[in-house]
Image (cartoon, rainbow, N blue to C red):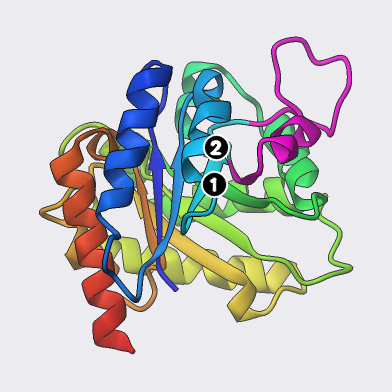
């Protein structure tokens, strides 16, 4: 299985979001084997994009989630509300929230627990280091710490999928992605940490790469067995790019079958 998660961030109105969802759907027409595609529009467009994706092979995801199913959390969207919209995925702990909005590790952990305990939603936990941390040779140590902090509250009573997106902060929006070799190395480390500290099996863990991915470099990441997919930012807003990324994913899946 390969995943393509499109994070539209704080862009597009409702009409534009619906139009982009419809345009993205066209990329899968006539394809027998496709990746798991997750569209993550702004909260204001979730309901309308949900209607567009109904009875299609694409899935709806949220860019953020509140720290519980419901409650006194002004401005947040709870798991129960997202389930009502048939959201099946939620992004948690994106670096733009951790750094730009000062979201602490404790909040990330609480949100991960909230989604983990949902019967119908799968969490996409984001981790990744800043440039100065990588330059100091502490990238593995830093990402390991993010994972340990996030998963410590998870109850392992039932098997469930945990998706972790490695997004090096220095690559996001810069046009300079990590090398596939760096992404592979980090993916292997992430898997090892998760399997070490949880009772999850190897098939329960998927690791994605994100950070300046586009139609030109998508195949170089997707063809690697240790990279289960991509978390795509700016390129997912461009029809030509997202179509090219989805074509690469379909080609890789067909070649591996």
Magenta part of the protein: which range? Answer: 65-90
Label pair 2/1, CB-CB below 8 angstroms: yes
For the residue labelled by badge 1, is the local secondary structure a helix, a strand or a loop? loop
Task: Report the quarter where the C terminus lies.
Answer: bottom left
Q: Residue at x 89, y 68 (%)?
A: 157
Indicate the quadrant where residue 75 lies.
top right
Q: Is residue 85 magenta?
A: yes
Q: Is residue 54 left or right of residue 119?
A: left
Q: Which numbered dot is residue 54?
A: 1
Give the distance between the C-alpha atoms of the residues marked 2 and 1, in whole angstroms: 6 Å
Q: Residue at x 26, y 68 (%)?
A: 30
Residue 203, image x, y percentages? 59, 79
Residue 182, image x, y percentages? 29, 61
Question: Taking 248 as reference, is 1 above or below it?
Answer: below
For the residue labelled by badge 2, is the local secondary structure a helix, a strand or a loop? helix
Question: Taking 249 as reference, is 127 above or below it?
Answer: above
Q: Residues within 10 Å of mark 1 (few under 14, many from 20)?
A: few
Q: Is residue 236 left or right of residue 81?
A: left
Q: Residue at x 54, y 16 (%)?
A: 101
Q: Which numbered dot is residue 50?
A: 2
Q: Residue at x 64, y 66 (%)?
A: 194
Q: Is residue 214 magenta?
A: no
């Amino acid at each position: 299985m390969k995943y393509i998660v499109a994070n539209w961030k704080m862009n597009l109105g409702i009409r534009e979001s619906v139009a982009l969802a419809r345009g993205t759907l066209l990329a899968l027409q006539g394809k027998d084997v496709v990746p798991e595609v997750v569209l993550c529009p702004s909260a204001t467009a979730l309901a309308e994009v949900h209607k567009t994706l109904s009875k299609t092979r694409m899935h709806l995801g949220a860019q953020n989630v509140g720290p519980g199913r419901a409650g006194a959390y002004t401005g947040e969207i709870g798991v129960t509300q997202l389930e009502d919209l048939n959201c099946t995925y939620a992004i948690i702990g994106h670096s733009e929230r951790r750094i730009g909005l000062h979201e602490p590790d404790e909040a990330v952990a609480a949100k991960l627990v909230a989604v983990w305990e949902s019967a119908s939603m799968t969490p996409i936990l984001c981790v990744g280091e800043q440039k100065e941390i990588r330059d100091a040779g502490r990238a593995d140590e830093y990402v390991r710490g993010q994972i340990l902090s996030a998963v410590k509250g998870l109850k392992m009573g039932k098997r469930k999928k945990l998706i972790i997106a490695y997004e090096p902060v220095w690559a996001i929006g810069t046009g300079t992605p990590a090398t596939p070799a760096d992404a592979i190395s980090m993916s292997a480390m992430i898997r090892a940490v998760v399997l070490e500290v949880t009772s999850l099996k190897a098939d329960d863990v998927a690791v994605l790469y994100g950070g300046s991915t586009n139609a030109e470099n998508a195949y170089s990441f997707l063809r690697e067995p240790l990279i289960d997919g991509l978390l795509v930012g700016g390129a997912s807003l461009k029809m030509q790019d997202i179509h090219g990324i989805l074509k690469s994913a379909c080609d890789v899946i067909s070649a591996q079958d």
